[in-house]
């Protein structure tokens, strides 16, 4: 059985993330979407919330499961026996950082190949940061995030936006 992992922060999940997950599910027997917890990165949604969002969006894809890690992705891949680490690429600017990560992961776990999937033209500009920014500024993000989690995402972003600053 060929296992792949799809790691990311998914804060929040976007249609671009979901596209990569679906495509990976067509290439591998099992895909584990891994919510990567990075203590240095301040996320709007908790790891549990992000996992719940992904589960709700992928429930119709039978070979996809969701997990979380706060460790190295290469070590996680080794622990679950993953043959591949699947990463989506939106633009050339993504490639530099992703290529460095791929080389580091190969050094840490030579058994897992990094597989890059190019984003589709309808989501190549899309990022979680952009979703949050558009929403905070009053824009409609309905075409950017899966409908299963749209109201949760918008509600949280707007509540956070409307929260008075600490004095």
Image (cartoon, helix red, strand yellow):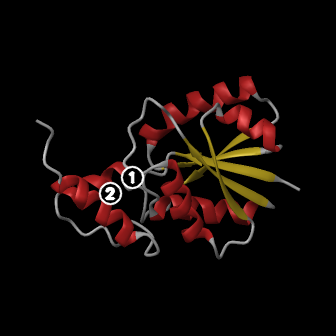
Q: Are marks 1 and 2 in contact (CB under 8 Å)?
A: yes
- Image coords of residue 41 (percent x, y): 42, 34
For residue 1, side relative to residue 75 (left or right)? right
Could you say whether the residue bearing mark 1 is in a helix, strand or loop? helix
Bin the neighbour count of mark 2 within 10 Å (Cα to Cα): few under 14, some 14-19, many 20 and up.
many
- Residue drawn 48% across the image and 51% down it: 10
Q: In which quadrant of the rendered image does the N terminus lie? A: bottom right
Q: In the drawing, what numbered circle is on residue 131?
A: 2
Q: Secondary structure at mark 2?
A: helix
Residue 149, x across and y down, in percent: 43, 69
Can you identify the residue that label 1 sits on? 128
Label placed on residue 109: none
Instruction: Give the quadrant of the C terminus.
Output: top left
Q: Is residue 167 left or right of residue 116?
A: left
Rendering coords of residue 3 (x, y %):
80, 52
Q: CA distance from mark 1 to mark 2?
A: 5 Å
Q: Residue at x 38, y 38 (%)?
A: 42
Q: How many tags in the picture?
A: 2
Left or right: 155 in relation to 78: left
Q: Nearer the viewer, residue 23 or 8?
A: 8
Name the spot of residue 104 as percent of width and height, x first: 65, 25
Decide if residue 39 is in sight here: yes
Q: Residue furthest left?
A: 167
Q: Residue at x 56, y 57 (%)?
A: 51
């Amino acid at each position: 059985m060929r296992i792949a992992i799809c790691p990311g922060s998914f804060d929040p999940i976007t249609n671009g993330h979901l596209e990569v997950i679906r495509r990976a599910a067509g290439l591998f027997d099992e895909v584990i979407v891994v919510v990567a917890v990075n203590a240095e990165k301040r996320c709007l949604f908790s790891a549990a919330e992000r996992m719940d969002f992904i589960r709700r969006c992928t429930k119709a894809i039978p070979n996809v499961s969701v997990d979380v890690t706060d460790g190295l992705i290469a070590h996680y891949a080794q622990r679950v026996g993953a043959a591949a680490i699947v990463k989506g690429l939106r633009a050339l600017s993504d490639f530099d950082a992703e290529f460095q990560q791929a080389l580091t992961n190969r050094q840490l776990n030579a058994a897992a190949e990094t597989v890059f999937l190019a984003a589709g033209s309808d989501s190549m500009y899309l990022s979680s940061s952009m979703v949050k920014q558009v929403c905070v500024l009053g824009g409609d993000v309905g075409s950017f995030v899966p409908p299963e989690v749209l109201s949760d995402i918008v509600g949280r972003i707007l509540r956070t936006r409307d929260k008075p600053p600490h004095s």
